[in-house]
Amino acid sequence: MPIHPEEPDPAVRDHTDPAREGAVGPSPADPPRSGPPTRREPAPGGQPGPGAAGDGPAPSQDEYEAELKALEDRWRRALADLDNLRKRHTRELERERTAERSRTAAAFLPVLDNLELALTHAGADPGAIVAGVQAVRDQAVNVLELLGYPRHAETGVVFDPARHEVIGVVQDPDAPPGTVVDVLRPGYGDGERQLRPAAVTVAKRE
């Protein structure tokens, strides 16, 4: 006798959960998942944490000591260079001072030669020594002017405290008040290159 397959009950099929229809169950070979994958949070301050990707191994003590030794060596070399520069500058400054003194002394050698010449002829012609001393004086004044220190012995000019030193105040009706009447000691130089001011007497103000 033929056996017909049993038809499914429509009532049972209608009560089936539609959300489970067509769902494929987990394969027995797949491991069960306990939850969503965890996410690594960044370290405070925006810096990557100790386990973040790209972190290399921490420097060892030997590397720290080698870096410190290199910095110390550079520091010592810089100090040595600075000391050598200071010594070289001192030598050059002293060399320039010596050269300047030599040039100044050499400029006055002709003045001494003329003084010796005037003294040599003083016995033969005593009157000539006066003219010789005046010539030597003029030569010395010229040397100082060439060195940048002109002579100032003017009278009748207005008193200038930067160029004159008052030795006395005199009553002179012919001189305007506050002007130089007489120069007792000439001055040399101007401004910052002044060797000394002129010693003068000044007309008294009314």
Image (tube, rainbow, N blue to C red):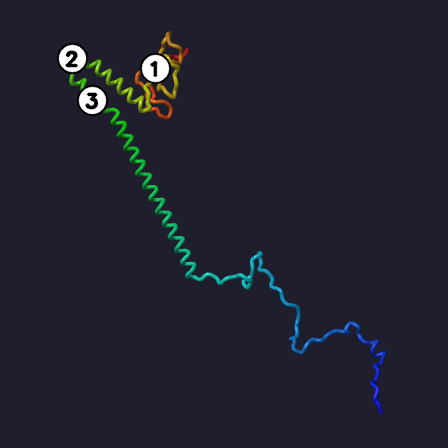
Q: CA distance from mark 3 to mark 1?
A: 29 Å
For label 2, count other residues whose C-alpha is less than 10 Å away and answer few (under 14), some (14-19) or many (20+): few
- Residue 21 or residue 149, whichever sits in front: 21
Assess disc 1: are there few (<14), some (14-19) or many (≥20) residues with their C-alpha within 10 Å of its C-alpha.
some
Which residue corresponds to the image point at 34% horizontal and 47% vertical from the top-left? 80
Give the left or right position of residue 135, taking residue 23 as reference: left
Horizontally, is 123 left or right of 39 in the view?
A: left
Q: Residue furthest left?
A: 124
The residue beneath circle 2 is: 125
Q: Is residue 127 above or below residue 32?
A: above
Quadrant of the rendered image containing residue 138: top left
Q: Position of residue 70 (x, y in %)?
A: 39, 54
Find the residue positioned furthest to the bottom: 1
Q: Nearer the viewer, residue 148 or 170?
A: 148
Q: Amino acid at mark 3?
A: Asp
Say what secondary structure mark 1 lies in: loop
In the picture provided, is 160 more to the left or to the right than 135?
right
Mark 2 and mark 1 residues within 8 Å of each other at the beta carbon: no
| Quadrant hosting residue 170 | top left
Q: Quadrant of the N terminus?
A: bottom right
Q: Is residue 143 above or below residue 20?
A: above
The outermost residue toward the front is: 2
Few, some or many C-alpha atoms within 10 Å of disc 3 (few <14, some 14-19, many ≥20)?
Answer: few
- Expressed as whole percent of the image width and height from the top left, the position of residue 200 reads 33, 16
Mark before the other along the chain sequence, 2 or 3: 3
The residue mark sitting in front, 2 or 3, is: 3
The residue type indicated by label 1 comes to Glu
Q: Label 3, on which residue?
A: 113
Q: Nearer the viewer, residue 169 or 16?
A: 16
Q: Which residue is mark 1?
A: 154
Task: Give me the C-alpha separation between circle 2 and circle 1.
Answer: 33 Å
In the image, residue 183 above or below residue 77: above
